Image: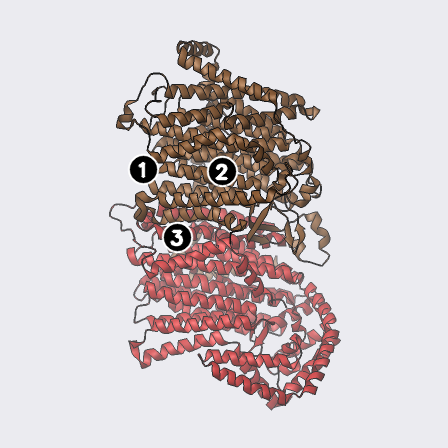
Amino acid sequence: MGFHEQIDALIDDTQRSLALFGPELALCGTIILLLLCRLVIGDRLSSTLVAFAGTVVGLVAALFSWSQVAGTSQEAFTGMLVIDSFTIYFRIFLLAFAVLFVVFTWRSGIPDREDAADFYTLALGSLLGMCLMVAANHLLMVFMAFEMASVPSYVLAGILKGRRKSSEAALKFAVYGAGAAGIMLYGISLIAGVTGTVHLPSIGASLANTMAADPSSSVLWVLGLGGLMVMVGLAFKLSAVPFHFWAPDVFEGAAAEVGGFLSVASKAAAIALLVRVAIGFGFVQEASAWVDAEDQSVVQTTNGVDQTSIASASGETTSQIFIAARIQDGNSASGQNSQDVQTTGADHQQGTDQQDTDQQSGDQQGTDQQGADQQTELTQPDESQLSPEQQAAEAERLAEEARALGIAQRREAQEVANESLGPVRTYISYLVGFLAAITCTFGNMAAYGQSNIKRLLAYSTIAHAGYMMFAVAGAIPSIGTSTTLAQDHISALAVYVAVYLFMNFTAFAIIAFLRNQTGSEEISSYAGLIRTSPGLAVCFSLLLMSLIGLPPLAGFAAKLLVFSALADSGLWVLLIVGALNTVISLFYYLRVIKAMCLDVPEEGQQVAVFPIWKNIDGWFIFLLTLPVVVLGLFWGPLREWALAACSQLLS
Amino acid sequence: MFELTTWMVLIPALPLAAALLTAALGPRLLKNKSHLPAVLCIAASFVCASILLWQVYQQTDDDGVPGGSSRVEKRLDLWTWAAVPAAMTHSGDSATDATTAEDSSFDFVIDVTLRTDPLSAIMLVMVTFVATLVAVYSIGYMNDDPGYWRFFTYVSLFVFSMTMLVSVSNFALLYVFWEAVGVCSYLLIGFWYQKPEASAAGMKAFLVNRVGDFGFALGVFLIWTTLGTLNFHDTEVDGVITQPGVFGQQVLSDGDYSSFPLATAGVLTAICLLLFVGACGKSAQWPLHVWLPDAMEGPTPVSALIHAATMVTAGVYMVARCTPLFVASGAAPIVVACIGCLTAIMAGFIAITQTDLKRILAYSTVSQLGFMFLALGTASLAGVVAGMFHLFTHAFFKACLFLGAGSVMHAMGGVIDIRRFGGLRKLMPVTHATFLLGCLALAGVIPFAGFWSKDAVLAAVHDAAHGDPSTNALFTTLYWLAWAAALCTAFYTFRAFFQTFYGEEEIPEEAGHHAHESPSTMTIPLMLLGFLALAAGALGPWFSNFLAHTPSLSMERLRGAEHAGFHWDVAIIGTVISVVGIGAAAFMYLRSPGTVSALTDTMKAAWLYQLSYGKLFFDQLYSVFIIWPLKILAHIFYVLDMLLIDGLVNLCGWLPRVFGAVLRPMQIGLVQFYALAMVLGLLVLIGILLR
């Protein structure tokens, strides 16, 4: 393949990838707009409004992409990112969160007019990083996204200028984050050195090869160490014990708004990334047996090692596929990513791809649907010029043949490879499970004695990170053996994250609104709330009960799914730890409810008055609490959706 | 639009709407109009239930055969609340299938499904009817109570829970609403929570019920692990049964649980007994009956609605619903019959000497519930039908009596001790007349409702005593014990009646200017209920024919024991006994009051009086054998607590402090230490890795 062809391939890949990148582009655009507005037109255009519009556009784009990606997962930007239903599910989740976050901060008024532009720039920047975390398919991307999400949040933690605690929290967060990032990078370099690749799906294959060759190879120790170090970074993001130290300080010091941001969005992205990394290490994808075909070697600098390992694993199968890939290349005169061959191996796939591309880019640019239509019309004749019917038919036939021949063998090779990865999965599962158990227990124990509601929720957040990690620990062992089972378990996590958004974020919102009235974030300041603002007290109680996991609230559904994943995987120890923790958590959540409903306010204590029907704040809380009840009663659709989200993870 | 399913949804939905509406608007907007949503919605719910009953009836009378074979059942699948597939079954085609049976892991599926069949249709009509009358009555009874809106919120919530309880088609949901009615009961018993007795009674009801509910929960767990489903109905996918239900077609056609590999007779008996423990708690059967008399601390309409007519019959309903399980178990129904009969006579005996009008009625309720369980315990179609019929008539006449007692209490300024008032018949003519109707029905005088239903119960027991030779002797004993209980019933009923309405007119000073007949919102429900106490017995034949169309009662196995005809001997004995009982009461309390004290003295000498008056000392027994040991245990723990550094409770706060001793200093400031901790944590993990 010549130089020009490679350049063409790159350009083509970038074009295709950008089309899949709509929501992120919307975020980028919003960030730039926010900065420019500040410079060019000053205060006349509210930054909040810009941020709101930008996030809504992003959310629409994300929702739109859900219907588009129905096929299989696709790699973007030469394999740096992977766009599959899992990515999109979390992307929708993150952008929906962003919209709610902007509305919430607008109401609670924490970034004052002056700070708003900076605040939203940072928050959206961090969100962009989180979107990338969710889609990361490459260890370098993992690190990049990780930093991109973290760095702005350090500043966010200190957004309350002039408050000593806030600045201190930000500094601690930054120092701690830097340490974690350093360790993670070290781990990545170890892994890259040993496996010879940083492309996540290839790591599994490479690892399988090593394992198959010598299951007790000393190289594995290095790999284990590398994995551990990567885990440190993730554990930092998840605030898993013992890498959680930053969390209570930061949550207490930072504004409740930022607390909500960190506890929901950041955690969701981190847990999704954990799933990605775990699958990357513990699973050999069908596709990865031949994904690094020649035409990609330009991009994949580390391919040499990889390819040989694969060749030995799948033998002649690969060559069969290469034929199909080449024909495909010849037809479209482009370095089409070979995964397209895998899906249908035919040109019409590409056609629809490009259509999708155009539609999406049309969407991003705003509303110019007509332009998109025109582009589509333009592409189609182009297409037919490039591939005359005969050629197309020929290609299709050949590709079909190759597929038929290859599929069985490829499956077999994949199975063998996956079997040899068993110990790796056990290792990951134990590591995650161990961290989850101590995280959960520690979080709940420490929450017990807190008198500051934000600190209490900080520990509760830590505990919930533990529950989420339980789901991952439960899913990993079955990743290579039973795809449906593993997807089922990961979907439990997806449900948990979605439910967690409503529970935790709304709880932080209530804290912020109450703080605006009384200026206090002590639990004791909530005494008598049931009398002055019954609606709010009921909502808050429902949220807390959902955080405990009492039926029929959404938290129960989420916990039920996570725990049944543990039971399915036979991780009884973790199940017992989880159940006991739920009992412990009962006490401190109920303490808050008791303070609101039973305690009598002290003489002269200011009790917040917060009508739930009379203003937007009240409606905001009410509408966000509603899903907690509704999803508790009807969680079938959410689960279906989560299952769909996970259906492409292990394809 | 006007189909069965519409009514099935509306019947519970309307009271729920009323509850939410009253809760939201009650304190500010509705205030003393808070009864409006409740009364209107519950009445509408009653109309829906009547239409539902009519439509269900339309479907039954096609064949015209008495107790015909047609099964009438309508289900409405609303949504699937939980669907967690079992690990093994859903990994699909692979070799793991073989392990499925061994692991016996079942899908955890809970369908939110409403069902209606003759059994639940009758319950729905009865519940909503009594609730409507009670709601109307409460307008008068509860007026100018500060918690007016709260009361109607709870009542609406209760009606919602109760209608759901009889509509659901799944044990998990049955449990949910079982608890929900318990909560409503708790809230309403403790309605006047400022009164220490009321809140103590609420607590007692809640705790005693907890014992029962624990058994019920275990029973539900056992059903799931044994049968693999909690649904009453079969789970169908495209017309093919994928999971047979607990009372599904398979079971009904087999007549037993042989199609479930794990369901041996022993397990089934265990299930039934555990479920019956739950029923004992809710329906106040010995030994868990102690909460019901205390529950009379609640407002009287609540006593009428929840603690006489509806909620306490939930246990009877549940056992009737589970007839296939009980029949298949063999041994469990005998336990049910024995406990029922024992409770009937015990409560009747206690009621003889009580002086609190409402408590007399409460013990009478316990006793009548015992009759119902006795009937169910015969495990025959006739028995189940008789038990349900007694439940049905009892709801009317007991509600009538309670509301009458409430009317008396209202007029007497809250005094309810029958020794402190008397001769009220002229003062309160309507209350007197309706109370008399209720008493006659309760005593079982022909042709009042209670006569027919009690007659059916005893006829069923009579049949059982001439059925299976192995249990003949037992059922014969139970038969005569039941008559003894019936004698007690007739006596204590009229004792209370005569003391209240006859003799010299006597009015306690608390009554003040209240001492007059109650307002029409209270007397009209009384009259309606009084009429039904007189006439509901006429529904008997129709009732049993209709109820026999219930799918779970139409098993072949139950059929053999059918023809619970009219037994002349039973009827004659019944009449004689009720006349003797009433006569004795009349003689002692109207003719020669001197005999009362004489007899009391004799009884006192034989310690019978003290036994009865002291309620057989169950409360004391429980205090000595359960509450005191627990308290002593608590004290031991308390001392241990003191010794073990403030004990278990503080330990929970202490563990974090232990952590804190290590962690909090770092948490306070030094970021360098955070970094060190991170490295240490990493080293620990590496250490584990290298181990």
User: Along the line of sight, which residue is nearer the eye, A497 or A244?
Assistant: A497
Residue B348 lies, in percent from the top left, at: 50, 22
For chain A, the rendered hue is red
* Mark 3 residue crowding within 10 angstroms, few (<14) / some (14–19) / many (20+): many
Label 3 close to label 2 by CB (< 8 Å): no
Amino acid type of disc 2? Met
Amino acid type of disc 1? Asn
The part of the image, by quadrant, that contains residue B147 is top left
Q: Specify the subunit that label 1 lies on.
A: B
Label 2 close to label 1 by CB (< 8 Å): no
The part of the image, by quadrant, that contains residue A32 is bottom left
Task: Examine the rendered structure and indicate whether residue B420 appears above or below residue B58.
Answer: above
Q: Is residue B669 left or right of residue B245?
A: left
Residue A412 visible in the snapshot: yes
Q: On the image, numbered disc 1 is attached to which residue?
A: B143
User: Along the line of sight, which residue is nearer the eye, A363 or A482?
Assistant: A363
Q: Which structural element holds mark 2?
A: helix
For chain B, the rendered hue is brown
Residue B645 visible in the snapshot: no
Asked if labels 3 and 2 share a chain, the reply is no
Q: On the image, numbered disc 2 is attached to which residue?
A: B126
Q: Earlier in the sequence, mark 2 or mark 1?
A: 2
Q: Specify the subunit that label 2 lies on.
A: B
Task: Examine the rendered structure and indicate whether residue A134 appears above or below residue A12.
Answer: above
Residue at point 49%, 71% (across, down): A62
Q: Which structural element holds mark 1?
A: loop
Residue B163 lies, in percent from the top left, at: 49, 43
Amino acid type of disc 3? Phe
